[in-house]
Amino acid sequence: MSSIDEKRVYGPDSDETALFVASETGLARVAVVGARIGEIELLDRDATNDLAVHDDRLAAATDEDVFLGTGEDAEPTGFGRAAAIGSDGTLLAAAPDGTVARRIDGEWEIAGAVEEPHAIDGSLIAAADGVYRCTGTDCQHVGLDDANDVAATGTPHAATADGLYRLGNGWLPALDGTFSMVSTDRGTAELGAIGRAHAATAETLYRHAEGEWSAVDGVDRAVVDVAYGRAKSASGGGVYAVTADGTLLSETDDGWRDHPLGLRGVRAVVARPDRKPV
């Protein structure tokens, strides 16, 4: 396994990044620079359902509560069991029963309800009965059915059981298939556009570049989430994908590297500049 010091051979356009991985095994932290993987550390052994970055802190949705931070510095928020979490500047969480709440001034305020929440990004929620937009104290159904994931940055996208959709004049089809995830890079997306992005079915990972979606060669595992590292260059940092069976994939100029994580039931990955506390 490469050490962090060995990875510092990367130039000034490569920033050290921490990946946080949610899984049935618990919450793990992986130190990375570019496609190089360093220390893998299990921070918490409690099952973690979802992750988000909020106010530059890690937010974790678990069967016990929503926590801000990890380890001894983890702050319980009093939400209770959470299935999904996200942030658009305000922390948004959904319980398994579909109750959705926003955390305002340290208190949770009910924002609405959805059917079987699957994922949150920004103010959008993917649920069994479609996509919702939650603002203030209200959640409005904004279309589609059986949504598995959403990406709110730039042009919003939704991964559903019957295709990948983008939001334009209504929801417009982007790709056919049964899509389980979609992710967009906040660092490269512009208002009303889409920068780096990935979406996946059980068989295929797709990437978005130069206005087109195309299948990624060399990835034969079912990807459950994708995260993007920050970098000083305009093209963005590293690209990292995780699979349900506990494999981390990092993109290189020649393809993708596999890195076993030793985790069961991986559910989500987020990236942020590598520093402590988290």
Image (spheres, rainbow, N blue to C red):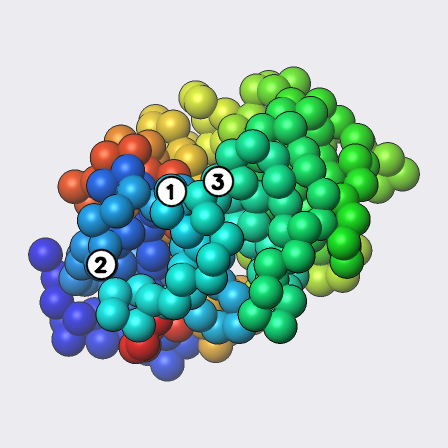
Q: Amino acid at mark 3?
A: Ala
Q: Earlier in the sequence, mark 3 or mark 1?
A: 1
SS at mark 2?
strand
* Residue in the image at 61% along x and 20% along y: 161
Q: Residue furthest bottom?
A: 12
277 with respect to 106 (left or right): left
* Residue in the image at 80% along x and 37% along y: 142
* Residue 130 showing in the rendered view: yes
Q: Residue furthest left?
A: 1
* Residue 50 showing in the rendered view: no
Q: How many residues crowd around disc 1 within 10 Å: few (fewer than 14), some, or many (20 or more)?
A: some
Measure the alpha-carbon separation of dots 2 and 3: 20 Å
Q: Is residue 86 above or below residue 247?
A: below
Q: Nearer the viewer, mark 3 or mark 1?
A: 1
Q: Which residue is mark 3?
A: 83
Q: Amino acid at mark 1?
A: Asp
Q: Amino acid at mark 2?
A: Leu
SS at mark 3?
loop
* Residue in the image at 22% along x and 76% along y: 8
* Residue in the image at 34% along x and 28% along y: 221
Q: Which residue is mark 2?
A: 43
Q: Which residue is mark 1?
A: 63
98 with respect to 171 (left or right): left
Residue 18's image quarter? bottom left
| Viewer-side residue, 25 vs 259 | 25
Q: Nearer the viewer, mark 2 or mark 3?
A: 3
Q: Earlier in the sequence, mark 2 or mark 3?
A: 2
SS at mark 1?
loop
| Viewer-side residue, 34 vs 74 | 74
Measure the alpha-carbon separation of dots 3 and 1: 8 Å
Percent of width and height locating residue 191: 76, 61
